[in-house]
Image (cartoon, rainbow, N blue to C red):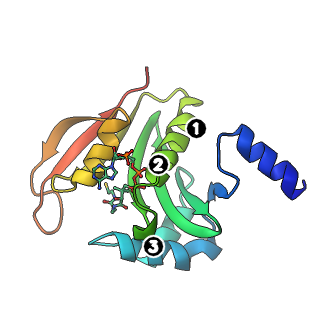
Amino acid sequence: MTATDHNKNAAVDGLSAAEVIRSMTVDDLPQVHALECAAQSSPWSREHFAEELGKAYSRTDLCWRDGQLAGFICTWLVAGELQIQNVATAPTFRRQGVAARLLAVVLERAAMTCFDAAWLEVRVSNTAAISLYERYGFQAVACRSGYYADGEDALVMCYRPQ
Ligand SMILES: CC(C)(COP(=O)(O)OP(=O)(O)OC[C@H]1O[C@@H](n2cnc3c(N)ncnc32)[C@H](O)[C@@H]1OP(=O)(O)O)[C@@H](O)C(=O)NCCC(=O)NCCS
């Protein structure tokens, strides 16, 4: 495929020509972990990401923009349910639709498997992530008291496909 063909296909897919979304490989681990450390207060270790590569039900999708790693989303698809394990956007790429794009990709892929629901936990203080999830159809359904290691509560959110 030529670069022109690739750009044409990207346009057909609704992507900008400079955006690539693909699965994480072992070679991506250093960059993914660096992004995680820049984005999260309690980051996953590099080993944690490596372990995800070994799980048949786990997938980590990466969003690259202009050759830079802009964000990732890690999901598990188990027994017809999608569990969103981790999402992060690099600070310099925030509010540019990266997480929304990744969320759309994983929900569209899950829809092809006739999934029942998507679930996630989010810190009650994480208003940015809660706004993102609510905007894309997730609803808060429960609160887990003291869920995180530092004692913060988790909001349990659920998305049900139409
Ligand atoms: C939460 C996070 C992933 C959002 O990533 P993002 O790529 O900046 O989000 P998007 O640009 O796709 O935002 C899509 C929509 O979500 C909502 N949103 C995203 N960030 C928001 C913020 N800081 N405040 C309010 N709403 C926000 C908005 O509705 C936004 O649409 P708009 O920009 O047109 O208003 C990012 O802030 C991040 O990496 N945070 C640290 C890691 C984290 O908290 N992960 C979630 C763990 S559960």
Q: In the shown orientation, is residue 142 left or right of residue 138?
A: left
Q: Secondary structure at mark 3?
A: helix
Badge nearest the viewer, 2 or 3: 3
- x and y percent of residue 60 in the render? 53, 57
Q: Earlier in the sequence, mark 2 or mark 3?
A: 3
Q: Which residue is at the far right?
A: 2
Rendered view: 143 above or below 23: above
Residue annotated with mark 1: 109
**Marks 2,3: beta carbons within 8 A:** no
Amino acid carrying label 2: it is: Trp
Amino acid carrying label 1: it is: Arg
Residue annotated with mark 3: 35
Amino acid carrying label 3: it is: Leu
Q: Secondary structure at mark 1?
A: helix
- Residue 18 sits in which quadrant? bottom right
Identify the mark at residue 76; answer none if there is no mark.
Answer: 2
